[in-house]
Image (tube, helix red, strand yellow):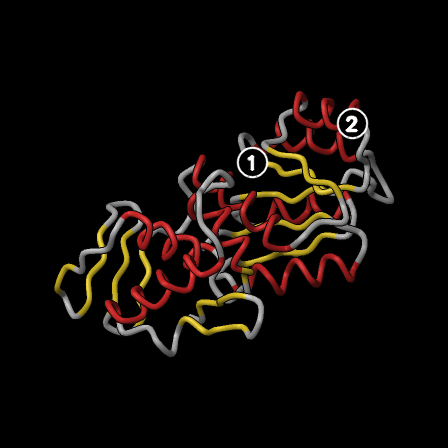
Amino acid sequence: MADILIIEDDRKISDLIQRTLSMTGHQGLPAFSGREALRALGENRIDLILLDIGLPDMDGFALMKRISREYGDIPVICVTARDEVPDRVKGLKGGAEDYIVKPFAMDELLARIQVVLRRFHKEQSLFRIRDVEIDLAGGAVKKAGNTVELTNREYELLKVLLLNRNIALSRERLLELAWGMDFYGDDRTVDVHIRRIRQKLGLEKDIRTIFKYGYRLEI
């Protein structure tokens, strides 16, 4: 679990991000201004910052520089409506690990968060679902203490479901995240592999089918 500071003055967006992070096992801490963000950083251990550039009391780029100077290497993802190339370049050159433009899909934001957390070794790697244990760091899957052999594609699909736990993902998105855009296959490929994962690990009730859409792993 990561502690993520959400610096966002739009309370609806902040609440949505906070709820989504909570569902995926992370802790979201809201700050609605630059001053609130600096106070939160002084009082909490923060693993990652989601930073809106257009804050009511200070420039987000200036805030990012101040955070880097005073609090060290806390990774930052800029989440902003500013979509001009100069702004993107300024954010990335200013130290942001990523730059995502509003409006955005929540699963895309989560995927980008996971990439940054992996880069800084702060992402959860060990998961337990009743008698099933999945160690993403070691690539091992066990059920009732016994190793379960998954194919590479089964494992990659399970990994995507875990990293996006409690979030419904379409079949197309699962194909893209698990095996890449150039994978040769269709929606039925996902269904076949989901069925095998369920059978091997006894996760029939945990991997929920979302009618005419895709799947969600509920933990």
Give residue 104's position: percent from left, percent from top: 71, 49
Question: Which residue is more in the foreground, 171 or 106?
Answer: 171
Badge 1 vs badge 2, beta-carbon distance below 8 Å: no
Give residue 129's position: percent from left, percent from top: 32, 70
Among the 4 quarters of the image, the one containing residue 113: top right
Give residue 63's position: percent from left, percent from top: 73, 33
Q: Secondary structure at mark 2?
A: helix
Q: Residue furthest right?
A: 56
Q: Secondary structure at mark 1?
A: loop
Query: Which class describes the residues within 10 Å of circle 1: few (<14), some (14-19), or many (20+)?
Result: many
- The structure residue drawn at horizontal position 54% and vertical position 54%, both measured from the top left corner, is 172
Among the 4 quarters of the image, the one containing residue 53: top right
- The structure residue drawn at horizontal position 66% and vertical position 50%, both measured from the top left corner, is 6
143 relative to 34 in the view: left or right: left
**Between marks 1 and 2, how big is the CA–CA gap?**
18 Å
Give residue 169's position: percent from left, percent from top: 54, 61
- Residue 183, placed above or below residue 208: above
Residue matched to label 1: 75
Q: Which mark is residue 87?
A: 2
- The structure residue drawn at horizontal position 54% and vertical position 64%, both measured from the top left corner, is 167
96 relative to 47 in the view: left or right: right
